[in-house]
Amino acid sequence: MEVAAFGGGAMTAHSFTRTRVVSSGRAVLAGLFGPAQMAPEVVSMRFGPAAYKNPCPVGGDLVYQHNVGAKNVVVGATYSKASNFNTGFVYDASQSSSLGVGLSASSTFADFSESGTYGTSSTAEEPFPTYHGVASHARVTQFRYGLFRWRCVGPHGGAVWANYQTQSTDFAGGVADPNTNPNIYPQFCKQYDPDSGITLKRYAAWTFSAGVSIHDYIGINLSAQTGYDLGAQVAYRVTKPGPRRWICGLKNNPGGSNPPPGLIQGH
Amino acid sequence: MKRKAFVIAGAVVILVVATVLAITLSLSSSGPNSDGPFGPSGQTNLAENCDEITGHVLTYAFEDVKNSGSSDATIQRISYVNPRNLQVLQAFTIPFNKQTNRASVMHPGGPPQWMLADRTSVIRPGHQYLLVLVTRLIGQEGRADAVLVNYTENGAQYVLRTTTSLDVKHQPLQC
């Protein structure tokens, strides 16, 4: 590990050098903790500013405890309700995601609630499968989560161990596309002829409220927001043969910016 | 002698500062405002429309504007930002209604007759209008970064830059 600094209620870390090992003839990266994971050969990460609360009344530090493993995170979703659609998704290099931070109610490891978010991004590009026809899929990748604990300054000096906190520490990779509920009813529509379509180059920021699957560890799932400052790409294409189709956004037209369209569906 | 040189040097400094100030002010006040009643201009592209066409003319009717001002706005010019192999043959606005909403984003060929009948350059307050660019593709592929709308409202000049780019391919090229 090259740099990891803790203090002042916010963690700053810059890059992690990993041990490269080989499994089944394919290059994999071994994490610092836990079993090796399938991942791109070059992975770096950048942490955004911490947006969570410091629970210490008079200050304290967030201290890393241990790795809690890779967790599934929803970074996007594509929806098609018609037969002549192709729907694709690419989680771009340097795409940033703000992932929920879990904080225990007290110094006991229990009663977690979401306490702000933490930004993590990756330099690895992940093309997800393109689906043809009627299909609604969440686009899921994995981030590694860690357990931290606040070490607060005591009222008369010294330090006391306080609340537990879980937050993302690293991008892990992996691609999964589970089915998702297709009933999102977007109202802002544009009509597209066959052989045309739209690619959202900077996928509109959308928060998947329970997008981080960490219920097994802390009893709740956390939110995941894919930002549109950098670029996950969502592509909708009307294919031939077939009639012209609608492409609709939940908050605005599919190419809108003020506000961005949010989730997109093909009809 | 020394005093005279000092005065001349001082005058030169004042002249230079005044000139720089004048240039800065003229530059900062030149050009239309990019945050007018049609909304703020986009700084970057958020999306791209792609279409494969068989002929060399298409009617691009994707962008719309809404006048959030208190008086009529007048469209002066609709154009592409940084067009490559795309030539605007005709550009106009039509009121946004049920029929307009069914218009294809990239209609092959020229505009249908009903579009031409509804043309207007006056955008009424609180109303939404569709921007229509009848476009010729020169060569096999044409691109534009966005659409630019120059307009006036209440005596002030404004410009709107949209956030969706356009990529038109002549078949057999594919999106």
Image (cartoon, rainbow, N blue to C red):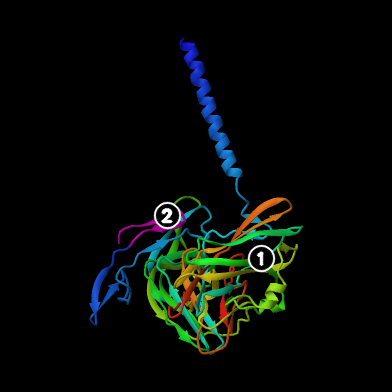
Label 1 SS: strand
Front disc: 1 or 2: 1
Give the image location of residue B119, x and y in percent.
70, 69
Q: Position of residue A14 (x, y in %)?
A: 36, 59
* Residue beneath disc 2: A7
**Kind of residue indicated by mark 1:** Val
Task: Kindly tell me whether residue A164 is visible in this rendering.
Answer: yes
Question: Does residue A82 appear to the left or right of A152 in the view shown?
Answer: right
Residue A10 lies in the magenta-colored region? yes
- Residue A154 in sight from this viewpoint: no
* Residue on which disc 1 sits: B65
> Picture quarter containing residue B118?
bottom right
Q: Which mark is residue B167?
A: none
Residue extending furthest top? B1
Of residues A107 and B151, the one nearer the viewer is B151
Q: Quadrant of residue A146?
A: bottom left
Q: Is residue A69 left or right of residue A263?
A: left
Q: Which residues are magenta?
A: A1-15
**What residue is rendered at 69% in x and 55% in y?**
B152
Callout 2: chain: A
Mark 2 lies on a secondary structure that is: strand
Which residue is painted at 37% across and 66% down in the image? A123
Residue count near mark 2 (Cα–Cα under 10 Å), binned few <14, some 14–19, many ≥20: some
Residue at point 29%, 72% (across, down): A29
Q: Residue flagged by tag 2: what amino acid is it?
A: Gly
The crowding category of the residue bearing disc 1, from other C-alpha atoms within 10 Å (few below 14, some 14 to 19, many at least 20), is: many
Rounded to the nearest whole Å, what is the CA distance between mark 1 and mark 2?
49 Å
Q: Position of residue A41 (x, y in %)?
A: 29, 71
Quarter of the image where the C terminus of chain B is located = bottom left
At 45% across and 57% down in the image, what residue appears? A10
